[in-house]
Image (spheres, rainbow, N blue to C red):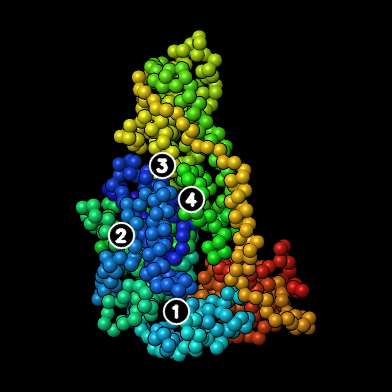
Amino acid sequence: MRREAKRYTITAALPYANGPIHIGQLAGAYLPSDIYARYRKMRGDDAVFICGSDEHGVAITLRAMKEGKTPQEVVDYYHKLNKESFERFGIDFDIFHRTSDPLHHELAQEFFLRLYEEGKFIEKSSEQFYDEEYGLFLADRYIIGTCPRCGYERAYGDQCEKCGSSLSPEELINPVSALSGKPPRLKKTTHWYLPMNEYEGWLRKWILEEHKDDWKKNVLGQVKSWLDQGLQPRAMTRDLDWGVKVPLPQADGKVLYVWLDAPIGYISATKAWAMENGKDWKAYWQDEDTHLIHFIGKDNIVFHCIIFPIILKAHGGYILPDNVPANEFMNMEGEKISTSRNWAVWLHEYLDEFPGKEDVLRYVLTANMPESKDSEFTWKDFQEKNNSMLVGILGNFVNRVLVLHQKYFNGVVQPIDMEARSEGGRIRGLDLDWGPEGFARKISLELESFKFRDALASLMDVARAGNKFLTDEEPWKKIKEKPGEVGEILHIALQVIANLAIAMAPVMPFSARKLAAMIRLPEEDLRWKNLGRYDLLPAGHQLGRAELLFEKIEDAVVEAQIAKLMATKEDGKLETANFPPVREEISYDEFMKPDIRVGTILQAEKMKNADKLLKLTVDIGVETRTIVSGIAGHFDPADLPGRQVCVVANLAPRKLRGEVSKGMILMAEDEEGRLSFVAPAENFPNGAIIR
């Protein structure tokens, strides 16, 4: 049975401090977490909203090298930019901390030492590539060589970005260091591994049984897939010079793995916030009556639902997540958002170009939030939702009521006999249920269930009901003969508006405050417990001055944004960035040598002791073959049986991790490393020849 909460610890995924924030990240983690945290605080719940910059890892170091800066200079710049952008957009973190802070380093090292001293790690030595000139071990991405599969000469030590094959540095032909450009040598190194396989049974019970009814299906599905494949020990240390130093005398030149380091950032941030506010941080992380909720995108599910919980479990004394409501991805203008291609709407640029329209973007992203499947942002839809929904429905209703009230009654709320006009929780003529199971409870339950799109739709239904009521009652026709009735009509409409100010606050806080000021609703009344009341503005209450709540967005504005995106394509950044040049010419006879056949995957399983490899059983018509493919990081084996693929059938057999692979699966890859199967557009018989 789900326990009741005394308090809430709400976290949003720590953004890497190596680039600005874009709308996909907002829709995935930051906006839903902000809506939920605002709702909890409006209810009067004890809730802390935690985030901060993730400032360690290879990505930071690579960015620093690319820009000719130190890692500290890079993280300082992007931490400041993102912190300010969040604040301007109304993402109301209680603290936006950073993992480069000494407090975080101290706590992360304490975590590691606790696990080390209690024997929770496995110590393993192996040979890894080492750059003599720079005097450091090389992460896989720091090693470049020729791909043994396709011959691409700039393949990385973990993946070939030409053919999509997952690789290990040892497989590269003529490997060189990305730092010095010289061949590295193999050198013995020692790391500490977390034996995740020992926690499989516990994870199955905790997530797949105890949370099967309240966690999202996409989260449960991804966790089950990983568990079904079998967890493997994962190294918790790295040979790098930027990060949290491993606190062992024999570990010079080693730092904590970023996925041990980063999530502890939630705890260190809470500790910093508690120190600043006279709170006990332990209550938010160690009290069983606290609900811990992680808001993330789907690419972080494994880390927040498997790795971090295992770390907390191994350490002991900490609560586990009550829920991890991960969202899917948001695409844009028919394509995936890509930071490397500059195919994105950047938050700091939007704030500069659309001053005063923070809530428009908050509304549009919430309405299109990728809660259960990938969603889409387009500038035309942005304009349409603003003009038809915010201006045409919500803003129009508020403006009509306030203007009429000022015109007829000088902005003074008129008396009403509400009992005479209401029955069974409803007011005659108004299609709105004010009762205990009415709209207030509906919106509350939707927010508590992380159904933010539904909650926003319910909010707009309240505005629609108010608009319809005003149109049906036609007070402008009754004012001369029945001014008292008109006063009652506008009184009812004003109570709807007061409720809208409350219901809007989690999603559109700027507009909610503006509306509350227009109707002079006291701040102490802007509490969630007042949602569903129809006596918030008593007779005799003086309203403020009416203003437009939202403004129309003209065609030229969105056309300029679309043109800005298209310019990215035209200058080549979008279509060709990061793709290697076309390779040297081949003759027609050479082209005809590969025998490519249509096949169907019959079985797929993860290979033991090979995180990147899948063992596929493929029917190619003339026979059934075993093919080993480096696509484990991109596809769930459970989803592959029955899928048609294209197979290079006459490729010489190759032994990979003890398994003979007879053939190669053709894949398409974009510049960010995402893979897609090359296959017939319609079902073809196995063995059909690709020409």
Q: Residue reaching furthest top?
A: 481
> Could you tell me residue 203's position as x and y percent?
38, 64
- Identify residue for label 2: 269
Determine if residue 72 is in view: yes
Of the residues tagged 1 and 3, which is closer to the observer?
3
Label 4 residue SS: helix
Q: In the figure, 642 relative to 88: above or below? A: below
Q: Nearer the viewer, residue 7 or 523?
A: 523
The label shown at residue 139 is 1
Q: Residue reaching furthest right?
A: 588
Q: Amino acid at mark 2?
A: Ala
Residue 12 as seen in the image, left or right of residue 352 = left
How far apart, in angstroms, are the residues tagged by discs 3 and 4? Answer: 19 Å
How far apart, in angstroms, are the residues tagged by discs 2 and 1? Answer: 28 Å
Q: Residue at x 42, y 28 (%)?
A: 545
Label 1 residue SS: loop
How far apart, in angstroms, are the residues tagged by discs 4 and 1? Answer: 38 Å
Determine if residue 423 is in view: no
The label shown at residue 352 is 4
Q: Amino acid at mark 3?
A: Pro
- Identify residue for label 3: 509
Q: In the figure, 551 relative to 36: above or below? A: above
Give the crowd class for mark 4: few <14, some 14-19, many >=20 residues within 10 Å.
few
